[in-house]
Image (cartoon, rainbow, N blue to C red):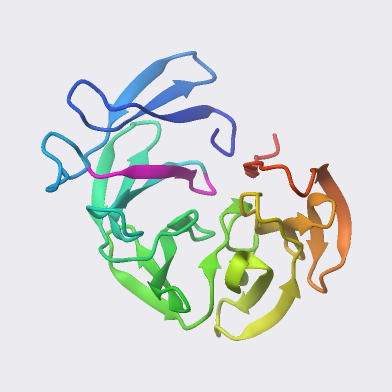
Amino acid sequence: MSPDERWTATLTEPARSGRPAVAFADNRSGARRNVELPVPADPEQEGRYLRTLWPTWSPDGRRLLLNVFEPGFEPRSEGIVLIDVPTLKARFVRIENALITVGGFQWTRDGKGVVVRWGKNGKSSVRRYDLTGAVKRTWHVRGRPAAQGQGTFTPSGRRFVTACTSLEKSACVWDTATGKAVTRIKLASSPVWSPVLGWYDERHLLAPTPGGVGIVDLRGKVVETLLKAPEKRGIHLRFEARGRG
């Protein structure tokens, strides 16, 4: 659902053409429309198109982003698809060879660009691109950009957070302007939970806690556990921000 709750977008099975598609529902009017995605054909599989995953709304709700994988099974990018609303016009933007593990491309706070991990596991950085696919900045920091709650960047955009150690047992907070480290926080973890990390507000993270998932301050103190979950039970969690009407 979009941040203003007007639109619901669902990545669907490939259409008759074989292309992946997104089903949009306008929650005000009730109108529905399927949008086929302009994804390149997969050169290794005749009649198939490149894998497309992880629909993600921009903070202002004006665009939907989807990750497009390169051929094969390596977690590398061929590019992204951007869909504007309410026109529902889709375009493919080629950004090759980014490392799109766990969430892939994430929005900048102003919605005018995207960030993604670049390099290889154990030795990577974070790159920012504009919406034409041009590289605008590289931060030489560890980890993948966080994907949940209010996303990678604080509401002000002054800081960003990455999952920065193996098995995602720590979160690292960085200064956006300088790229310097602000703090590193040890997180609770479970080998059978899906990763959960992002901003809750300007000074708190949404992150795993010993009892589940909750609000954690920048010293690592658990402020509140929002969802309790058994440590050994496999669960897939998704938290997204909503606008306040």
Q: Position of residue 131 (x, y in %)?
A: 33, 57
225 and 210: which is toward the camera: 210
Q: Position of residue 83 (x, y in %)?
A: 34, 40
Q: How many marks?
A: 0
Specify the quadrant of the image occupied by residue 160: bottom right
Q: Residue at x 65, y 63 (%)?
A: 154
Q: Is residue 199 magenta?
A: no
Say whether residue 22 is visible: yes
Specify the quadrant of the image occupied by residue 180: bottom right
Outermost residue, front direction? 232
Q: Which region of the structure is painted magenta?
A: 50-60
Say whether residue 164 is visible: no
Q: Residue at x 65, y 43 (%)?
A: 237
Q: Residue at x 59, y 56 (%)?
A: 151
Q: Residue at x 28, y 68 (%)?
A: 134
Left or right side of 147 for 46: left
Left or right side of 140 for 210: right
Specify the quadrant of the image occupied by residue 217: bottom right
Quadrant location, the N terminus: top right
Residue 22, placed above or below residue 55: above
Left or right side of 31 for 176: right
Residue 165, placed above or below residue 198: below
Q: Is residue 58 magenta?
A: yes
Q: Position of residue 206 (x, y in %)?
A: 72, 55
Left or right side of 170 for 106: left
Q: Position of residue 148 (x, y in %)?
A: 61, 51
75 and 90: which is toward the camera: 75
Quadrant location, the C terminus: top right
